[in-house]
Amino acid sequence: MRFYYTKLASQFKNLTRFVLILFLLSCAQKEPDFYRVTEINDGDTITVAFKSKGISPLRIERIRLIGIDAPELGQKPWGQKAKEHLKKLIEESDYYVKIELDIQQRDKYGRLLAYVWDTKGRNINYMMVKDGYAFVYTVPPNVKYADKFLEAQKIARQEQKDIWSSKGLKEKPSEWRKKHPRN
């Protein structure tokens, strides 16, 4: 009887190791391309955890979505609605995104500038504009998808989606920021 339990325990250990190896391999396949979103800061900024080498296993970066400008949180209710919509898009991707940089990699606040892609291959920057939660905000030299974003904005305006509706946003975020500068 004792031999049976020893053999059973050995098989269980082997099964546990096998499951652990499969889990680690599945994670390894996702990690090189996709990164974990840890926070939705507002309608055009997220925080992402990157694996890094060295002492610290994670590097945390704030990422500003290139080519768009969502209402500020102080622009009620549209700032909060834009943040919630971005959160919904990120949730649909299980909080994993792919990051694509353009020419200029950081803004004056030190944020990483990026195009963000979900696990379905959709550009989240584009989706925010198309769904009526952000304006096109092109700042050269980062203009890779400017034409596509302008197309999306044209459609959102024609369909009077959210910020473009009759009860939509009354002031562009850039104008609002001039009246309410950061400290």
Image (tube, helix red, strand yellow):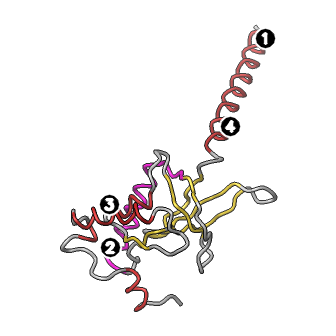
* Cα separation between marks 4 and 3: 36 Å
Q: Which residue is pictured at 40% across the width and 77% down the height?
A: 72
Q: Which residue is pictured at 28% across the width and 77% down the height?
A: 169
Q: Nearer the viewer, mark 4 or mark 3?
A: 3
* Label located before the other in sequence (3 or 1): 1
Q: Which residue is mark 1?
A: 2
Q: Determine if the magenta segment contains residue 111.
A: no
Residue 24 is marked as 4
Q: Check the picture and name the quadrant holding the N terminus.
A: top right
Residue 100, percent from left and from top? 57, 58
Q: Nearer the viewer, residue 175 or 77?
A: 175
Mark 4 near mark 3, Cβ–Cβ under 8 Å?
A: no
The segment highlighted magenta reads: 75-97
Q: Which residue is mark 2?
A: 78
Q: Nearer the viewer, mark 4 or mark 1?
A: 4
Q: Which of the 4 image quarters holds residue 103?
A: bottom right
* Cα separation between marks 2 and 1: 68 Å
Mark 2 near mark 3, Cβ–Cβ under 8 Å?
A: no
Q: Nearer the viewer, mark 2 or mark 3?
A: 3
Q: Could you say whether the residue bearing mark 2 is in a helix, strand or loop? A: helix
Specify few, some or many for label 3: CA neighbours under 10 Å numbering under 14, 14-19, or 20 or more: many
* Cα separation between marks 3 and 1: 65 Å
Magenta stretch prevailing secondary structure: helix
The image shows residue 171, relative to residue 81, as above or below, that is: below
